[in-house]
Image (spheres, rainbow, N blue to C red):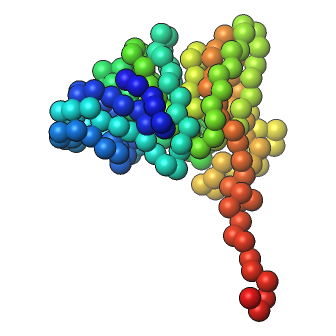
Amino acid sequence: MKVESGFVEVDAGSWLVSRGQPAAFFGKAVRRRRKGWLVRDRGCLELVETSGSARCADRTRPFLTHIPCAAPISAVSSKVLVAPCEARTGARSVKLIPLSLAGSIGVTDFGSEWLVTATRGRTTRVQVSEGETFSVRPESAVAWSGADPTGFCPRLGVFDMILPRRPRELLLTFYGPAVVWLEGACDDKTAVLPQRRPYGI
């Protein structure tokens, strides 16, 4: 595996990749059906067998992070770009609000080898010591090693339990010891406002 010029290059083999990957490859790339009745990360990740080397990249998520799996790693499924298929140990949904699906996050677990994530912003690694807590906005979480985070919301109303959206003030709280990878956060509603032209132009 090699990360170069915004691409991840992998050799021939079986790979767990995000949808639409690989971007280019030598030889053939065959998509295989993922076995299992309930595969929770099926909507985000596919199994691809390549007969030659392949390159993976996502232009909407240009920042790549190589994460070695010396210890078990839990990664947000939608942010995984490529990993060896044998590294995956399972997938699940982490509920952040009791009795509600609004705050759940799809997570893929890896127990060996490595994985590469693709994110919209740069990724940093934070070490959380024993006895410390570390809070992260849900959209900033990329991966972690250690116990799963718990949801925390200073104010949780009845509508936050009913409506299909996350509460505005929801945070993920990690308890040490843990290692957390995170990317920058932004408010999409203000980040993508269209530019309006003056009248008459």
The residue positioned 53% from the left and 42% from the top of the image is 62
Q: Residue furthest bottom?
A: 200
Q: Position of residue 69 (x, y in %)?
A: 46, 15
The correct choice, above or below, for 75 with respect to 157 in the image is above
Residue 121 occupies which quadrant of the picture? top right
Q: Is residue 112 left or right of residue 144?
A: left
Identify which residue is drawn at 74% across, 77% down: 196
Q: Where, quadrant-wise, is the N terminus in this rendering? A: top left
**Direction from residue 123 to residue 130 in the image, left or right:** right
Task: Find the residue positioned furthest to the front.
Answer: 5
The answer to whether residue 183 of the structure is visible from this angle is: yes
Image point 36% across, 31% down: which residue? Answer: 9
Q: How many marks?
A: 0
Decide which of 147, 50 is in the foreground and name it: 50
Residue projecting furthest to the right: 154
In the image, taking residue 105 as reference, residue 84 lies left or right, namely left
| Quadrant including the C terminus | bottom right
Please provide percent x and percent y for residue 159.
71, 54
Q: From the top left corner, tell me how far across and down residue 79 is, in percent.
A: 50, 38
Q: Position of residue 120 (x, y in %)?
A: 59, 44
* Residue 93 at least partly seen: no
Residue placed at 76% from the left, 19% from the top? Answer: 133
Choose between 100 and 59: the one closer to the eye: 59
